[in-house]
Image: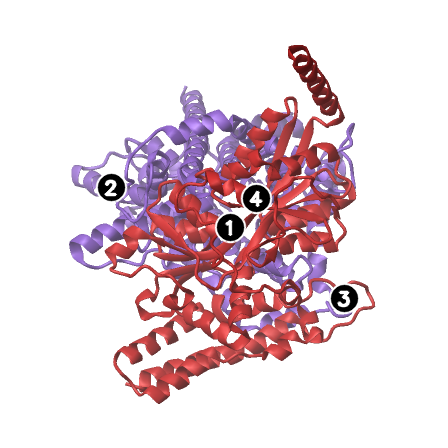
């Protein structure tokens, strides 16, 4: 097989191109920033003393532990939320599956600071729920206090990663596996535990590791809930308050990256040596069966409770966007459409920019994601895994650091055919977004390719198709579900990215929605308008998600018809 | 007469259009101000100068400074427009500002005890702001809490867990409040008072806007905020109110022309506009509510609007020493974070125990001891003023040959150990006293 690498100049060229892209837009900018972590502030020499300081500081030790704890707990809570949703929608003839999967996805598209504002108003110590409980029962529940608040918000925010990947995996499981197990007498929980869940493992691990990493280095949520004793807020606070030359912020950033790489490695170990691919694809997915009446009741109850919790930020945001004044009361004092009127009058460009940027970034992401997944799983190029690792490391790079890195790297250069600095050109914003969101698309594409059996490609090649044709006609169509899931995840999360955006936006006419929301939310009178803008973001991405779902479903039906005929 | 008037008009139109030609049709402003403020100035100035377009780049003050520093080699921005004077000092120190003195008349030299303009002429004050106390009227009524008036009030047990503030390291204006009290009451007494107030904190917010936001939504009842946050929240209809305590410093919010600005004429015209009668009046808008620097503009202000040029009690109690503040800027921020922000839970718990002990009439000697432990400082004022020591907290070595001994993280860890032990001991003593 090794000789094949040499026979594939196409693959090698692809590898080099992607490597160059990653090098210029991720590695170099980040290294330029990370360099500071290894500088002795007193002498300017290279040193490791800053890392020693890190491990000797009790605040940082505490932050490290807290970040770890919050990330782990969030994975557990997110799993509890997504398991029933994924299971019900893939295993049963369940009306409203599309709604669950679309609505279940919606939390991701909420900018974290907006979500936290809405959650505070509903679940905060004097939020609607606690005011009601205090009035009728005389006690309150501290949902939003300290680390619990972060775990609560994070699991609601990020569980879709697990839901999407797990559902895709469940949908791709070869039905015959389940049928064989049933023929051999297995059913119910045992069937799920022994056959279904293990087969869905790649999707689950992909989703769970994303949740873990995302929570581990998320900045917005702890910052908004004023929880400072975690790693990412510490890094941000150090860099933005002590100054760009303070080494500790960068030391933390380095540690975040290293630790995230370690977590990725552990996740890949968990999957190592196991073959999850299935031969049959079309019409796959678990055999769906009808629910009995009482099963339906239980299922609906669980789903409704979960969806209520999961959609509560949106409920809060809706109230906020239509409310006049909302202060220390269960509901706003009055309702008015004026916030919507003002945003459509003042800032239509935010919406247009967001659509352009997020769809461009997501397109770049799925192209890169598919290519990297293919190179990693199918080629024999040496160092191919490094593409994967590097792309995934983007997950651990705080947006602020990437933004500063871009300013440092590209400011001296001018855009082609112009005299503007490259760093403040809007295209750089698109590239920064695509780098930041590449890991999502890559995980989705990789897990999709994991499930495409190599024998199908070999069959195509035996029948005379060349590599390109095989990829185009066999691999990509079979991966389509995963690719689309990747596109939607990247698109939706890019649409609400803020931390790199805020560093790179150089003029309001180039600014996306998230920036607009941030700007509105910085003044007392702007809270309603910011919420209205947030609702617009939610609606845009929810519509996009719904339609892509329709497309996947349609494609799947058509293919299964072809198979059956 | 008619002819002369017409010809005058014609001439003035001609000169106006001439000056329009001289002025660029674009203006790029880096600002930390909220949209409610920039929107009004933008539309008024664009209306006055047809064909001119203003780009408002909104960045947090610290991010704005960084943006200007990083883009200095290829500058595309004209003006920096933000609150904290120290931010302008940083830019001035980096030689990123250009001198400009507006021809606007009627602006006094000082507001409160703070000079309005940079004495070297690199930046210009256009509005004044001071720190004070903001509260949610519904919250206080529901929980039966009295309305606070002075900083001392916030140390009372009745406010425990009801107060919010932003960390001084997060916002330049918060730093001014902390420093104003330190200068007004002295180093040890000032810090002791801050820690007593902080013992009642519900939260230390990471963003300065987090405080008015929390008070507006009722997450906590009382906030230590800059005046326009309180006044504009009230103006927007929230059930909140605001007052200046006696010990507060009024400081100007500023605008400065950047070096190598691509549109200098438009930039200068904008500064003049800010200081004109029309520009100053915009500050009174109910969503803006900042204190104009032109005393005459106050004639148009709504009833009850504070006027520092008439009411000499606002901002006069502290003779603010900018040099002293600057010399220990990062050190004070770091101390606040070590003693308060990152040890919030320990401090709150110890304070609660002391308040309970006092309510239960516990052993007064032990309570005093516990209070002294909380007030104890890890370093003295003299140590803090030592320029050698302060160097550890300097952002930059100016030259590669500069040497500093000690590292910030190392020093902070030493302080943290002392502070944590003190709070734990105070808690133990307070619990034992009754």
Q: Are marks 4 and 1 on the same chain?
A: no
Say which chain tag 4 marks: B
Mark 3 residue crowding within 10 angstroms, few (<14) / some (14–19) / many (20+): few
Q: Which residue is mark 1?
A: A274
Q: Which residue is mark 3?
A: A46
Q: Nearer the viewer, residue B341 or B102?
A: B102
Rounded to the nearest angstrom, the CA distance separating label 1 from label 2 is 32 Å
Give the residue displayed 66% in from the left and 44% down from the top: B80
Going by the image, does B27 lie left or right of A193? right
Which quadrant holds the N terminus of chain B? top right
Residue A417 point in image, percent of width and height: 78, 27
| Above or below: residue A72 compared with residue B186 | above
Mark 4 residue crowding within 10 angstroms, few (<14) / some (14–19) / many (20+): many
Tell us which disc is closer to us: 1 or 3.
3
Rounded to the nearest angstrom, the CA distance separating label 3 from label 2 is 60 Å
Mark 2 residue crowding within 10 angstroms, few (<14) / some (14–19) / many (20+): some
Query: Could you tell which of marks 1 and 3 lies nearer the N-terminus?
Result: 3
Q: Which tint is chain A?
A: purple
Q: Is residue B249 visible?
A: yes
Give the residue displayed 31% in from the left and 86% down from the top: B433
Q: Are marks 1 and 2 on the same chain?
A: yes
Tell us which disc is closer to us: 4 or 2.
4
Q: Which residue is mark 4?
A: B294
Q: Which residue is mark 2?
A: A299
Rounded to the nearest angstrom, the CA distance separating label 4 from label 1 is 76 Å
| Above or below: residue A307 compared with residue B434 | above
Going by the image, does B200 lie left or right of A333? right
Tell us which disc is closer to us: 4 or 3.
4
Tell us which disc is closer to us: 4 or 1.
4
Rounded to the nearest angstrom, the CA distance separating label 4 from label 2 is 67 Å
Chain identifier, red in the render: B
């Amino acid at each position: 097989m090794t000789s094949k690498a040499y026979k594939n100049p196409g693959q090698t060229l692809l590898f080099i191109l992607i490597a160059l892209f990653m090098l210029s837009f991720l590695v170099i900018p980040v290294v330029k920033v990370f360099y500071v972590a290894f500088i002795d502030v007193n002498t300017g020499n290279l040193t490791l003393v800053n890392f020693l300081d890190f491990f000797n500081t009790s605040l940082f030790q505490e932050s490290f532990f807290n970040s770890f704890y919050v990330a782990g707990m969030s994975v557990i809570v997110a799993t509890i939320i997504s398991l029933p949703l994924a299971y019900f929608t893939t295993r049963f003839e369940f009306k409203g599956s599309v709604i669950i999967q679309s609505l279940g996805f919606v939390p991701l598209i909420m900018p974290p600071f907006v979500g936290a504002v809405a959650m505070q108003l509903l679940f905060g110590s004097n939020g609607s729920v606690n005011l009601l409980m205090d009035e009728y029962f005389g006690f309150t529940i501290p949902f939003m206090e300290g680390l619990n608040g972060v775990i609560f918000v994070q699991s609601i925010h990020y569980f879709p990663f697990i839901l999407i990947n797990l559902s895709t995996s469940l949908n791709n499981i070869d039905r015959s596996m389940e049928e064989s197990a049933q023929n051999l007498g297995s059913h119910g929980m045992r069937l799920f535990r022994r056959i279904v869940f293990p087969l869905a493992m790649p999707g689950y691990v992909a989703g769970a590791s994303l949740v873990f990493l995302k929570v581990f280095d998320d900045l917005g949520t702890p910052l908004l809930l004023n929880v400072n004793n975690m790693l990412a807020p510490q890094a941000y606070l150090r860099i933005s308050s002590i100054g760009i030359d303070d080494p500790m912020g960068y030391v933390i950033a380095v540690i975040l990256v290293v630790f995230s790489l370690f977590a990725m490695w552990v996740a890949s170990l968990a999957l190592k040596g196991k073959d999850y691919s299935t031969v049959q694809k079309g019409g796959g997915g678990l055999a769906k069966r009808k629910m009995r009446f009482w099963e339906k009741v239980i299922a609906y109850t669980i789903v409704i409770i979960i969806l209520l919790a999961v959609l509560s930020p949106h409920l809060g945001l809706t109230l906020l966007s239509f409310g006049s004044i909302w202060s220390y009361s269960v509901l706003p004092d009055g309702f008015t459409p004026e916030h919507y009127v003002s945003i459509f009058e003042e800032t239509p460009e935010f919406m247009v920019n967001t659509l352009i940027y997020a769809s461009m970034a997501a397109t770049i992401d799925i192209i890169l994601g598919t290519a990297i997944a293919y190179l990693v799983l199918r080629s024999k190029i040496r160092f191919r895994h490094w593409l994967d690792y590097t792309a995934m490391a983007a997950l651990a790079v705080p947006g602020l650091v990437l933004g500063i890195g871009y300013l440092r790297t590209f400011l001296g250069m001018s855009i082609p055919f112009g005299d503007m600095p490259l760093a403040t050109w809007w295209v750089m914003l698109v590239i920064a977004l695509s780098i930041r969101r590449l890991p999502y698309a890559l995980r989705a594409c990789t897990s999709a390719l994991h499930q495409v059996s190599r024998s199908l490609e070999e069959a195509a090649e035996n029948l005379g198709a060349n590599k390109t044709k095989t990829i185009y006609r066999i691999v990509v169509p079979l991966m389509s579900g995963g690719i689309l899931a990747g596109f939607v995840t990247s698109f939706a999360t890019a649409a609400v990215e803020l931390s790199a955006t805020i560093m790179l936006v150089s003029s309001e006419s180039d600014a996306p929605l998230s920036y607009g929301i941030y700007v509105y939310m910085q003044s007392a009178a702007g809270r309603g308008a910011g919420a209205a803008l947030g609702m617009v973001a939610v609606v845009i991405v929810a519509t996009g998600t719904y339609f892509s779902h329709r497309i996947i479903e349609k494609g799947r039906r058509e293919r299964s018809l072809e198979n059956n005929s | 007469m008619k002819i002369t008037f017409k010809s005058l008009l014609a001439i003035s139109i001609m000169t106006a259009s001439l000056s329009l030609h001289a002025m660029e049709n674009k203006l790029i402003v880096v600002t930390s101000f909220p949209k409610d403020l920039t929107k009004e100035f933008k539309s008024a100035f664009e209306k006055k100068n047809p064909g001119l377009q203003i780009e408002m780049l909104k960045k947090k003050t610290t991010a704005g400074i960084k943006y200007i520093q990083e883009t200095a080699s290829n500058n595309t921005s004209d003006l920096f427009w933000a609150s904290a004077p120290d931010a302008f000092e940083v830019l001035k120190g980096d030689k990123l500002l250009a001198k400009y003195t507006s021809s606007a008349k009627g602006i006094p030299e000082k507001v409160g005890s703070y000079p309005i303009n940079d004495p070297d002429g690199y930046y210009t004050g256009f509005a004044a702001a001071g720190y004070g106390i903001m509260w949610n009227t519904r919250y206080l009524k529901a929980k039966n809490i009295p309305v606070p008036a002075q900083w001392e009030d916030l140390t009372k047990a009745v406010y425990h867990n009801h107060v919010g503030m932003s960390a001084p390291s997060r916002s330049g204006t918060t730093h001014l409040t902390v420093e104003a009290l330190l200068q007004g009451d002295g180093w040890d007494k000032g810090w002791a008072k801050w820690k007593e107030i902080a013992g009642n904190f519900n939260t230390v917010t990471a963003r300065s806007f987090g405080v008015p936001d929390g008070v507006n939504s009722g997450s906590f009842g009382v906030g230590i905020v800059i005046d326009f946050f309180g006044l504009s929240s009230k103006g927007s209809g929230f059930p909140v109110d605001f007052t200046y305590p006696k010990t507060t410093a009024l400081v100007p919010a500023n605008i400065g022309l950047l070096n190598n600005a691509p549109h200098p004429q438009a930039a200068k015209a904008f500064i003049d506009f800010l200081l004109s009668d029309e520009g100053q009046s915009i500050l009174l808008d109910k969503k803006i509510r900042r204190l104009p620097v032109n005393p005459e503009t106050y004639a148009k202000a709504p009833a009850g609007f504070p006027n520092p040029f008439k009411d000499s009690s606002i901002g006069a109690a502290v003779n603010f020493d900018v040099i002293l503040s600057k010399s220990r800027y990062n050190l004070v921020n770091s101390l606040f974070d070590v003693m308060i922000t990152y040890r919030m839970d320990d401090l709150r718990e110890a304070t609660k125990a002391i308040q309970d002990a006092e309510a239960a009439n516990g052993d007064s000697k032990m309570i005093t001891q516990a209070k002294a432990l909380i007030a104890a400082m890890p370093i003295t004022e003299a140590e803090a003023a030592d320029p050698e020591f302060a160097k550890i907290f300097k952002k930059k070595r100016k030259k590669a040959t500069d040497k500093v001994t000690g590292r910030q993280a190392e020093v902070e860890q030493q302080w943290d150990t002392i502070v944590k032990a003190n709070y734990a001991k105070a808690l133990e003593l307070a619990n034992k006293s009754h």
